Image: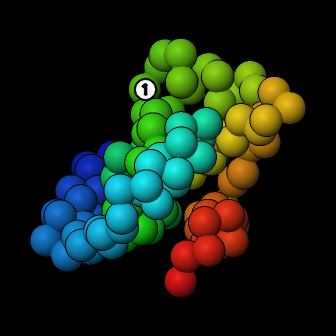
Amino acid sequence: MIVIRWVLGQIILLVDFITSPKPVIRETLAQKAIDDATASMSMYQFKACPFCVKVRRQFKRHALHIELRDAKKEGEFKEELIREGGRHKVPCLRIEKADSSVEWLYESNDIIAHLKSQFNLT
């Protein structure tokens, strides 16, 4: 089973690489405003997770520079996801709000919908 998952993961990554979307080009000030807003976000992910790939493709398509954190390996990001997010499930978008509270958003479709509404993306 581990070998099958590994092979499927490599196929997913290869297809993602070959069909990678082209990022949108914005004016410098507009891109800076988006970069400033996304600086308070990070996504916990597994590299070969198909749902994580789906969200990362949206990041690239819309030129959203959001920090990626590998939550698969033992370490601080996995522990932080479990401790603060409540479960070891990816993708998970961590959003630090202006009032210093933190929102943990799970599910790829919910993450994409949030980003589209936040940044008026199509």
Q: Please tell me which residue is depicted at 35% across the width and 46% down the height of the picture.
A: 47
Left or right, residue 54 beside residue 114? left
Residue at the spot 36% in from the left edge and 67% down from the top edge? 26
54 w.r.t. 3: above or below: below
Which residue is more in the foreground, 85 or 32? 32
Badge 1: few (under 14), some or many (20 or more) residues near its Cα, within 10 Å?
Answer: few
Using the rendered image of the protein, determine whether residue 64 is visible from the camera's viewpoint: no
Residue 94 lies in what quarter of the image?
Answer: top right
Residue 59 x/y as whole percent: 43, 60
The front one of 36 and 61 is 36
Mark 1 secondary-structure assignment: loop
- Residue at 33% x, 72% y is 24
Q: Is residue 39 left or right of residue 100?
A: left
Check disc 1 and report the residue beneath it: 73
- Residue 99: x, y in percent? 86, 32
Question: Which residue type carries mark 1?
Answer: Lys
Here the colouring is rainbow
Q: Position of residue 22 (x, y in %)?
A: 24, 73
Residue at (20, 76) in percent of width and height = 19
Q: Is residue 120 visible?
A: yes
Residue 90 pos. (x, y %): 57, 48
